[in-house]
Image (spheres, coloured by chain):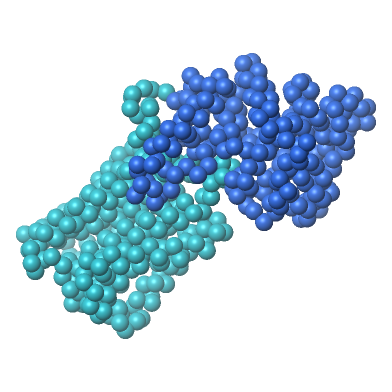
Amino acid sequence: MANVLEVRGLNKSFDGIVVARDIDLTLQSGRIVGLIGPNGAGKTSLFNLISGVVKPDSGTVLLEDAPLDELKFHERVRRGLSRTWQHIRLFPSLPVLDNLLVGTHDYPGERLVNVLFGRGRLQEHDKIAREKATDILGRMGLARVADALVSDLPYGQQKLVGVARTLMGDAKCLLLDEPMAGVEGQSYAAMQRVVREVADRGVSVCVVEHNVAFIRDLCDEGVFMFSGTIMARGSVADLTRDPQLTELYFGH
Amino acid sequence: MEYLYGIVIIVGLYVVLATSFNLIIGYGGLVSIAHPVFFALGAYASALLSRDVGIPVLLAMIAGMLVAVVASIAMALPSLRVSGDYLLIASIGFQLGVLEVIKNLRFTGGPGGFTNIPPFLIRDFGRESYVVLVLAVTLAVILLVRWIARSDYGRAMSAMRDDELAFASVGRDAMWMKIAIFGLGSGLAGLAGALYAHYFRFIAPEQFEILQSAAILTMVVVGGLRTTWGPVVGALLLQALPQALTFLQLPPSVLGPIQGLLFTGLVLVFMFFRPQGLVAAEDVWRGASSRVRKTGEAT
């Protein structure tokens, strides 16, 4: 299976506190990898380093064998490395559908030059983008709330919108930061279904999640992190059975 | 009549200044105080090019606008590369610095001002034609900013203001969007400056001082940020008030400070009692193509 994302020798520390120590990680096309570990293990920090929100002290990140190290966060997203946020970070002043439309890459209507001089060809693109957004919302069970304000939605649905927004950009690799925290009921099932669908289309997915049931049901593999280091990689069942790791996870 | 024409033109140009500043500070969320200096750059560039270089006035006016665009981008680029907060600091330096340069150069007329600026339209078609021109430009600027704010670009501006990191996470570069907004807004101020110069035919550095920045900001805040008609109402009100005050026939030594107190007082009163301004903006972006806007359906 092809490596989509490859991380080599990533290091980062803040004032002596190590958040990443010699991290090597590969993510393959079509596979979902769960990143597990106790709070403060460096899971979100690893996402920040991979996505370019935070610069590493050393190490390299490759997407389909092309190094990303010189690229800024938004440039990495355009290359196909997408992520969500633990605290969602939607656009609260926009309706749900428009939150997704902003997520379209190369939206010609959002170039000032086109707004001023080229109305005609925008409509076709707008139609395609709207169809795509409506389709994604439908698959997530959000069709009914397309025109609602995101801040009026229950928390679980907001999380879904956060994932839906990243799907507008045709990611090759998707990093999901705690997609299930605060998500219940129908949204839970919808989230699981959508993430599986995304992976089945060849996207490599990495999930940070404390919900062990979710990780066990969904992930093809687990990676255990502790104190900025990757301790083990294997099937989720094996990792959760390992007494040493369980002790690290729950403390003494 | 000439007095009235003068007032109409001044009010029209301040509507242009307030509307373009609303694009920068309201829609773009960019804090700058350098709006008067781009007004000045448009005025001086157009005046110089037409009087001393001999370029036709219409072309000189367009050039004046472009000078303001280029200068604003040159000012914004280095500061926005660092962070949005630095734009304010850079703009203070730019506002004060450029005016000092203008005061100390010979070919700008120095502190005494720049005189004998060639007129435009007035000789052939009378003063009325210039009034029509300014009002047409004013209306065009109002509609342009309204159109941008409601277009897909306006939606992206809303998203950028909401959360810059989230905006980056959908593959967008906030920096270039800010530069485009700042360049366009400052260019419109430059156009206002060019229109000012060729009507009044005399410009001096003191007309573009930092106090003007306070006046423009007051117009936008009192009128209503992020609204089409707020800056218009604000500009009308704040131009009408000082004019009304002159009818009180107070001595100039009293009148000046009273105007200053009025501006500051208004901003404070509005900040406390009506922060949304006279014309309140919707909290939610509603584009021209938005289904909610079309059906009027509440969310």
Image spot of residue B107 (x, y percent): 30, 82
Question: Given the current orientation, which residue lies at the most extreme front position?
Answer: A1
**B215 or A122, which is in the foreground?**
A122
Indicate the quadrant where residue A179 lies. top right
Indicate the quadrant where residue B5 lies. bottom left
Q: Quadrant of the C terminus of chain A?
A: top right
**A216 or B249, which is in the foreground?**
A216
Image spot of residue B215 (x, y percent): 31, 56
- Does A15 sit left or right of B74 as displayed? right
Numbered circles on residues, count:
0
From where the camera sits, is residue B253 visible? no
Residue at 34% in and 60% down:
B187
Taking A214 as reference, is B189 above or below it? below
Image spot of residue A130 (x, y percent): 46, 31
**B83 or B143, which is in the foreground?**
B143
Q: Quadrant of the N terminus of chain A?
A: top right
Q: Chain letter for cyan?
A: B
Residue at 14% in and 60% down:
B130
Q: Chain letter for blue?
A: A
From where the camera sits, is residue B132 visible? yes
Taking A106 as reference, is B248 above or below it? below
Residue at 28% in and 64% down:
B62
Indicate the quadrant where residue B276 lies. top left
